[in-house]
Amino acid sequence: MAKKPTWVIDKERTRRAAAAETVWLFGLHAVEDALRNPAREKLRLVLTKNASDKLAEAVAASGMEPEIGDPRKFPAPIDPGSVHQGAALEVRQLDWGSLEDRCHAAPDESPVVVLLDRVTDPHNVGAILRSAEVFGARAVIAPARHSAPETGALAKTASGALERQPYLRVKNLANAMQQLSDMGYLLVGLAGEAEDNLGRALEGTGDRPVALVLGAEGPGLREKTRATCDRLARIEAAGAFGSLNVSNAAAVALYAARLR
């Protein structure tokens, strides 16, 4: 087989790199919220006639010209099993800025942020973003590697929260935790074996920023993450059996932090 010319290889690499920088969002809610988000760079919109009618107002506001596709052979390059509801939008990932800019707390503020230690399931992260928005979290922070990236599945589960709730991807989670600590945050890690329950761990913290740290289901918090926390706490259960998945645990913890 003949070797490809260098210019062909370079062109293919450039195309792959450009594709990797974009995300296909799908589903009526996710697409509508992205269309209405002025901070979102939008590239290509594919709709069925039915979806176009439902999203007419958002499409008009975005200034985009949609491609009308056949619902029996939807032309957007997304997983055939995706529940796209006749709507798909190619976008560039959102830039939420730096951790310091997003999480800075004024003297009279006591914000809450969520840190995720290797939570890779996009459905869990999408649900956490939704809860974070509902309970007013300043940001959701996760490592750039070994965490759920911004994808269509995550956006659909977040039900629009991805467009409004900052999702910061950092190079090193422990370093980000230390940075938050230097900014005055109390780092509270959730661990099932912790002696204190979450209520006691949050007592007297109403005037201080709090960072809730959650680990992946199964392994939980890594050793370095655990060691960097100021306190460990458990969500107290009524019985000896059963546990919450990470997205439900995040919702409970966010609610508890809001009641401080």
Image (cartoon, grey):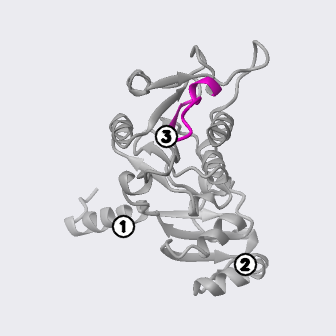
Q: Give how far apart the Cα atoms at labels 3 and 2 are.
A: 42 Å
Please, what is the three-letter code of the amino acid marked with disc 3? Arg
Quadrant in which the N terminus appears: bottom left
Q: Are marks 3 and 1 in contact (CB under 8 Å)?
A: no
In this rendering, would 177 be left or right of 133?
A: left
Which residue is pictured at 68% across the width and 70% down the height? Answer: 87
The numbered disc on residue 208 is 3
- Residue identified by numbered label 2: 55
Extreme residue in the left direction: 6
Q: Which residues are magenta?
A: 199-216
Disc 1 element: helix
Q: Nearer the viewer, residue 109 or 223?
A: 109
Which residue is pictured at 79% across the width and 15% down the height? Answer: 239
The answer to whether residue 175 of the structure is visible from this angle is: yes
Please, what is the three-letter code of the amino acid marked with disc 2? Leu
Q: Nearer the viewer, residue 120 or 190?
A: 190
Q: Is residue 247 above or below residue 201?
A: below
The numbered disc on residue 15 is 1
Q: Quadrant of residue 62?
A: bottom right
Q: Local crowd at mark 3 within 10 Å, few (<14), some, or many (≥20)?
A: some
Disc 2 element: loop
The answer to whether residue 219 of the structure is visible from this angle is: no
| First of labels 3, 1 by sequence position | 1
* Residue 206 belongs to magenta span: yes
| First of labels 2, 1 by sequence position | 1
Q: Are marks 3 and 2 in contact (CB under 8 Å)?
A: no
The numbered disc on residue 49 is none
Which residue is pictured at 51% across the width and 69% down the height? Answer: 91
Please, what is the three-letter code of the amino acid marked with disc 1? Arg
Q: Local crowd at mark 1 within 10 Å, few (<14), some, or many (≥20)?
A: few
